[in-house]
Amino acid sequence: MNIRDFLADVGATYDHALGTRKGVHAQDLLRAAPTHFAPYVPAGWVVTGNGGNGGGGLTPWVGVFSPRATLDAKKGLYIVYLFAADLKTVTLALNQGVTVLQEQLGRAGARTALEKEVERLVGELPPLQDGRWREPMDLACSEYRQRAYEAGAVATRRYVLADLPSEAELRSDLSHMTELLDLSTLNQAKHLRATRSESEERDFAAAERIMQAGDPVERFKPKDASDYVAHIAGKTLTKRRDHEALVKEFGLAAQERGFTANTNVHPRDLTLRKDSTEWLVEVKTVYSGNATQAVREATGQLLTYRHFLYLAKAKPAPHLLGVFTESIGDGYAQFLETINIGSVWWTPFGWEGSALASEWGLA
């Protein structure tokens, strides 16, 4: 079921008076949201549908959570489709968790904190100032929680359920909202970092270096290929959850195209085979729309692994492929092709890629 059909079906059949038991169509549909939305969200992101706890909720919702922000609707930033209580509209929103703030500050204090953070984020991030994402949320409900949802909305787009946009537009909107969430998450991290004391900043910087140090050859100068292989064989690479999910999803997609995928090839992310040809694959996350670091890291690792794990061991050179969480832009795709590296990236409409990747049958 695509996004448009899902939203329309919930809007047409939801009735909070029926409760949350199994067999209630709209509740079953909301529980199945992770399956229905999986093709349209980035790898590793988590989807949850909710029609209430115990009794049916007044405003059912579907949450989309980034592992870089929060996986808990009670706190932090996340994306949500919120149905109005009158079931006339559904709003796609970049929203803030209410529950934890309410426990800490009380109802009035929590609402004030939510509104201040909206003001700060919108003031500091020009993409959030675009009028297309400033439609006021109206949940047609005067209850505190619904008013708090409205107060905490950082970016919104409201749809009339009787006249939903096309599926392509809905997917595009959701994809853009994931970019806004990434951007806002990065901004919050920098803001929190900026307000730390000098000693806290040193601790934070040290922890950040440790968390980001995933290269097994950092500060290592191999004498030869055997030294390199011996060194990395005993190292464990720290992979993010969304990284592993993207490896899995692309591997499955490649298998559907007739390739054999192998992830048991440490320290490489993935290798593909078709007939007698092998592809060496490096998977990278593009953060906040900035592909520069991801492209540089993929290029360096692909060339390094090809040299030490293939050429230096007199093995046939594989084709090289970079796989990314989102588009890296035509310029970077063309750059990679000048050094015979193909590129593929995830989109809500399926896997797309460079000319070389298309020629190989991988996009």
Image (tube, rainbow, N blue to C red):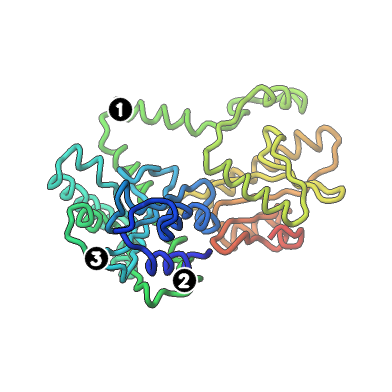
Q: Are marks 3 and 1 in contact (CB under 8 Å)?
A: no
The circle on residue 169 is: 2
User: Dot 1 lies on which element?
Assistant: helix
Identify the residue shown where x is 46% and y is 71%. Answer: 169
Chain-order first, disc 3 or disc 1: 3
Q: Are marks 2 and 3 in contact (CB under 8 Å)?
A: no
CA–CA distance in space, label 2 to label 3: 21 Å
Circle 3 is placed at which residue position?
Answer: 138
Which quadrant is the C terminus positioned in? Answer: bottom right
**Residue 53 horizontal side relative to residue 274, left or right:** left
Which amino acid, mark 2? Glu
Circle 1 is placed at which residue position?
Answer: 200
Which of label 2 and label 3 is nearer to you? Answer: 3
The circle on residue 230 is: none
Outermost residue to the left: 108
Toward which corner of the image does residue 7 lie, by quadrant? bottom left
Which amino acid, mark 3? Asp
